[in-house]
């Protein structure tokens, strides 16, 4: 046997290393053999090799009964220096579980590179295919290598981090170079072929929709048989016992197994003609009892091809057979019967990963009554599987049998990725050589309008055409809409005259990535303004026509994309991502993995009625958002207790972020023959927010979350949503260091965005994300995006300014939160009054003795205080630690319905007093909104102080306890006078020794990252 390693390529390698570019090559070591690929020229971050390295498998391994899993395959990506030496860019170690037994079952593995040493850094990944092959002719090997790819056997734990440098050093074989000391390797060039990609993580594999459902089980270890000696027990067909990898992979499952019957309708051939012209418009109807589903119809095609997979839930199997019926579509009369195939369900085989679904077979079409062959054949396949099957993501679930084909397609589970947003900054300085139509005007009023899509800003009016104003706009990659600057004269009442226009395509706008070493924006430039277009009727004098073609007005601009900011599309309190727009400034690797399992919902109310019969129905689906990733479960039709059982994974770059999950009732499902325009916006049924930092490491939290929806007349309870979440840290040191860093990128503190611009920029970012996600297929509804990203304190109508949004319910909730924060202070005051009043004499005596001891030894004051903090935190860990994530709070119990009606009111109702009272009322609402915000902020700070020792964020509390213990030891060892002097000197230190202006301290960053009840406010 031989081991074949196909090196496809590498990506995201460092662009430059030293003065020259990177000249990468890949070296693979196995069993004392080391081979390498060719050296690629420098300057390419994404390198492609498509080369094959062959290694001989030691025969003693087979005779000893050992498998490949006992050894390792070391892969390293190196840079070839000009002097002939090499330097390591990254490494990865693979084990025998990643090697497929044949080329047909091998998949493309994308392995992230680990750093070669403790102080080095690594970036990028390498793509490989590994499989075993017998020694044969080169043609046979090439044919086997080009076979179809299948599922991976063991991808969960196939890689590991290592720092062993000895295994990768030594002689090597370089393609195209001189002969070396190692054994010759067979190197082959292959054309690039699209294959399924398997990404390595410390979690199970994902489906195409991002769902994590039943990862494939690893195969039994491959043992080469000994020549001439039959394997012991080869004639017995006993199932392989479960391995440790099986048990470890099963630990990551958080959903229940759902069983389905899959039917794959591929194509048909030689269908008979069904009308006078011998034409046919065929389609296929798959029927299991009362449940059925149909493919799309083909127009006048005797050899149609569908390639559609249908899934029937085990709970919906009401028959013993599966009927596959081919029909001819007729728009005038009933559809004609062509033929059918009947498959007994008991004879349908079962399939489970890593096995692929069974191959499709040809079946002859038979008549409905006599069972005779009617002409024509159909190719299909049927098997029994679960949601771990690879066909689950793209299958059309036949539970929606009464819907149109387009509506059924909209019920599938999908994964969406939001576009990468960036702030486009346009600094409008001045304009020159403007030509007005009215040449005799003495003082024109000139202003400039900056527009990007639906975003529009205007400068102030200036007679001298000098503005010097800076504007922020939200742009999305890839750039599509141009930037339009229009210079206008607004001196005429009710009319603006266009003096010039400039259209800047996005390709001409530079992207500036500001970091710690670069803060200066690019230099401004002068641009030519296009003159106003002619009205087309030949008016105007000759000087104007000549000016339009030769003379150009000028405008001075500084336009660039500032990618060092994080575009805020949600409030920082509920944000799920704080990474900057530039990829180079982002964290190189996540600090953990967040797993979400959407299990089921109970008691969902109906928000609509079916047509004709008027029966209430619920078509529920869930939408979850974390970071740039949006996921949507499949829509379960006509059930108030849906069971999704879908699992998703998200990369966590900052634990102090929020996961948001919402439930919606779909109004877009249109039945067959109904008007597709009757669908309205999907109705929200409630949402849940979970703070990642409040989750324990590797601990699974499964609990029901109540769903509430605020309505103008009442607070509606919409059932419960059962979720299971788990956070698994992968980089403890990096994760803990984030608690001492600012939340937002440094650019937000070096050059902060004006506060009054943040609400408008956030609304613009939400509109951009909504527009991009609406262009997906199937689209993610705009109301779902707005509902997940909406500011809870804002008015339900986006037309109402945020400062004008007032809610008495939230004001009362803020007062209640403040009362809860001050409750311990009141309890302490009551306890001191009890000590002073000798309510409990032993307590009073102990307090007096403690006071005398501290006065006699003042150096014990601070150690005693920090020791008390440590003891209180330890006591709360064992007695008052939260059992799970906090639930959503509404604070609407006992609230008068008039308060809720006022919360949804955009202004005074009709019949209010005159305009003076109306103006005072609006001023009162604005002042009340500001007081509401102030009280909420004070309550948030107090709740963060309480969370310091409450173990709500276990990692933060552990850091606080460690700091308290360390401070107790330091304050005990250092004299009190020295501590006070050092603290005074540190507070009044020279400005050059302080942090950069505007950047918060480490203690302030730690305090701001603590959780509060604002995370769960509705």
Image (tube, rainbow, N blue to C red):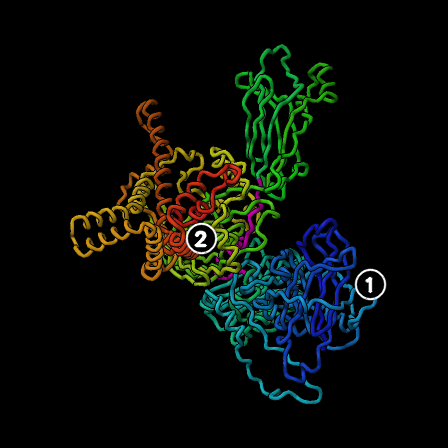
Judged from the image, the secondary structure of the residue bearing numbered disc 2 is strand
Percent coordinates x, y for residue 276 in the rendering: 65, 58
Q: Is residue 89 magenta?
A: no
State the quadrant of the N terminus. Answer: bottom right
- Residue 1016 visible in the displayed image: no
Q: Which residue is mark 2?
A: 661
Q: Marks 1 and 2, Cα distance to the nearest angstrom?
A: 55 Å
Q: What is the quadrant of residue 968 in the picture?
A: bottom left
Q: Which circle, 1 or 2, is nearer the viewer?
A: 1
The answer to the question of whether label 1 and label 2 lie on touching residues, with beta carbons closer than 8 A, is no
Looking at this view, is 56 or 531 the one in front?
A: 56
Give the residue drawn at x 58%, y 30%. 450
Q: Is residue 730 left or right of residue 837?
A: right
Q: Is residue 725 left or right of residue 189?
A: left
- Residue 70 visible in the displayed image: yes
Q: Which residue is mark 1?
A: 176
N-terminal label among 1 and 2: 1
Percent coordinates x, y for residue 187 in the rendering: 78, 67
Looking at the picture, does residue 691 appear above or below residue 221?
A: above
Percent coordinates x, y for residue 573 in the rendering: 44, 45
Magenta segment: 394-422
């Amino acid at each position: 046997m031989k081991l074949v390693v196909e090196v496809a390529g590498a990506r995201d390698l460092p662009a430059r290393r030293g003065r020259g570019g990177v000249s990468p090559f890949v070296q693979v070591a196995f069993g004392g053999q080391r081979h390498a690929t060719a050296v690629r020229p420098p300057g390419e971050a994404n390198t492609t090799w498509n080369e094959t390295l062959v290694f001989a498998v030691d025969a003693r391994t087979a005779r000893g009964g050992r498998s490949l899993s006992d050894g390792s395959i070391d892969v390293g990506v190196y840079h070839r220096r000009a002097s002939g030496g090499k330097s390591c860019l990254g490494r990865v170690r693979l084990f025998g579980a990643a090697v497929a037994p044949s080329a047909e079952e091998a998949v493309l593995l994308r392995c992230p590179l680990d750093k070669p040493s403790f102080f080095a850094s690594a970036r990028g990944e390498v793509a490989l295919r590994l499989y075993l092959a017998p020694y044969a002719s080169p043609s046979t090997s090439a044919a086997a290598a080009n076979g179809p790819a299948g599922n991976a056997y063991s991808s969960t734990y196939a890689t590991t981090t290592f720092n062993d440098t000895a295994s990768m050093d030594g002689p090597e074989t370089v393609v195209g170079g001189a002969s070396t000391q190692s054994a010759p390797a067979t190197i082959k060039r292959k054309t690039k072929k699209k294959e399924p990609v398997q990404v390595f993580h410390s979690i199970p594999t994902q489906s195409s929709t991002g769902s994590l459902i039943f990862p494939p089980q690893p195969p039994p270890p491959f043992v080469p048989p000994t020549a001439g000696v039959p394997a012991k027990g080869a004639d017995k067909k006993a199932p392989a016992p479960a391995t440790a990898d099986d048990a470890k992979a099963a630990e990551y499952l958080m959903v229940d197994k759902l069983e389905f019957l899959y039917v794959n309708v591929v194509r048909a051939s030689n269908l008979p003609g069904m009308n006078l012209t011998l034409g046919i418009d065929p389609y296929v109807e798959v029927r299991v009892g009362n449940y059925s589903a149909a493919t799309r119809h083909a127009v006048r095609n005797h050899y149609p091809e569908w390639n559609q997979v249908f899934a029937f839930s085990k709970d919906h199997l009401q028959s013993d057979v599966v009927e596959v019926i081919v029909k001819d579509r007729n728009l005038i009369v009933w559809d004609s019967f062509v033929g059918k195939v009947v498959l007994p369900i008991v004879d349908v085989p079962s399939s489970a990963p890593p096995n692929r679904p069974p191959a499709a077979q040809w079946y002859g079409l038979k008549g409905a009554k006599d069972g005779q062959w009617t002409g024509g054949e159909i190719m299909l396949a049927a098997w029994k599987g679960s949601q771990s099957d690879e066909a689950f993501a793209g299958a059309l679930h036949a539970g929606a049998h009464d819907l149109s084909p387009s509506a059924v397609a909209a019920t599938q589970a999908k994964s969406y990725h939001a576009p990468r947003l960036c702030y486009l900054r346009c600094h409008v300085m001045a304009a020159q050589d403007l030509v007005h139509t009215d040449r005799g005007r003495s003082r024109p009023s000139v202003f400039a309008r900056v527009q990007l899509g639906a975003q529009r800003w205007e400068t102030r009016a200036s007679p001298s055409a000098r503005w010097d104003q800076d504007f922020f706009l939200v742009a999305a990659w890839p750039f599509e809409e141009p930037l339009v600057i229009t210079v206008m004269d607004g001196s005429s009442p009710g009319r603006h005259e266009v003096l010039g226009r400039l259209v800047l395509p996005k390709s001409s706008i530079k992207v500036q990535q500001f970091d710690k070493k670069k803060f200066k924006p690019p230099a401004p430039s002068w641009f030519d303004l296009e003159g106003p277009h002619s009205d087309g009727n030949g008016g105007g004098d000759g000087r104007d026509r000549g000016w339009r073609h030769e003379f150009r007005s000028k405008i001075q601009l500084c336009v660039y994309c500032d990618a060092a900011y994080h575009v805020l599309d949600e409030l920082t309190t509920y944000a799920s991502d704080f990474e900057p727009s530039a990829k180079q400034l982002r964290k190189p690797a996540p600090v953990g993995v967040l797993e979400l399992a959407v299990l089921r919902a109970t008691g969902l109310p109906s928000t609509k009625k079916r047509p004709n019969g008027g029966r209430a129905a619920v078509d529920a689906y869930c939408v979850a958002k974390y970071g740039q990733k949006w996921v949507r479960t499949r829509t379960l039709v006509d059930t108030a207790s849906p069971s999704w059982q879908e699992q998703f994974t998200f990369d966590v770059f900052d634990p102090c972020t929020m996961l948001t999950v919402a439930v919606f009732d779909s109004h877009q499902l249109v039945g067959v023959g109904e008007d597709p325009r009757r669908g309205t916006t999907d109705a929200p049924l409630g949402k849940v927010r979970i703070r990642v930092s409040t989750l324990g490491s590797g601990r699974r939290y499964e609990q029901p979350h109540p769903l509430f929806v605020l309505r103008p007349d009442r607070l509606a309870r919409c059932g419960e949503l059962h979720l299971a979440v788990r956070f698994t840290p992968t980089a403890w040191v990096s994760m803990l260091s984030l608690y001492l860093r600012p939340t937002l990128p440094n650019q937000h503190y070096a050059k902060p965005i004006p506060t009054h611009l943040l609400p408008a920029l956030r609304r613009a970012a939400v509109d951009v994300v909504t527009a991009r996600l609406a262009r997906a297929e199937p689209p993610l509804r705009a109301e779902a995006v707005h509902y997940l990203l909406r500011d809870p304190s804002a008015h339900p109508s986006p037309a109402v300014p945020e400062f004008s949004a007032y809610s008495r319910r939230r004001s009362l909730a803020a007062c209640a939160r403040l009362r809860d924060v001050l409750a311990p202070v009141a309890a302490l005051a009551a306890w001191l009054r009890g000590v002073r009043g000798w309510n409990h004499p032993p307590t009073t005596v102990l307090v007096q003795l403690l006071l005398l001891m501290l006065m006699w030894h003042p150096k014990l004051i601070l150690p005693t205080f920090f020791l008390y903090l440590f003891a209180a935190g330890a006591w709360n860990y064992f007695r008052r630690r939260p059992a799970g994530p906090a639930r959503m709070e509404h604070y609407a119990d006992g609230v008068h319905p008039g308060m809720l009606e006022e919360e949804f009111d955009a202004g005074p109702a009709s019949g209010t007093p005159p305009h003076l009272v109306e103006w005072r009322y609006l001023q009162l609402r604005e002042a009340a909104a500001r007081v509401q915000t102030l009280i909420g902020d004070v309550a948030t700070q107090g709740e963060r102080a309480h969370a310091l020792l409450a173990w709500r964020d276990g990692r933060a509390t552990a850091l606080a306890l460690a700091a308290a213990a360390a401070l107790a030891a330091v304050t005990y060892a250092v004299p009190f006078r020295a501590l006070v002097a050092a603290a005074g000197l540190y507070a009044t230190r020279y400005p050059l020794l302080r942090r950069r202006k505007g950047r918060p301290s480490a203690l302030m960053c730690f305090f701001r990252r603590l959780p509060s009840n604002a995370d769960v406010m509705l």
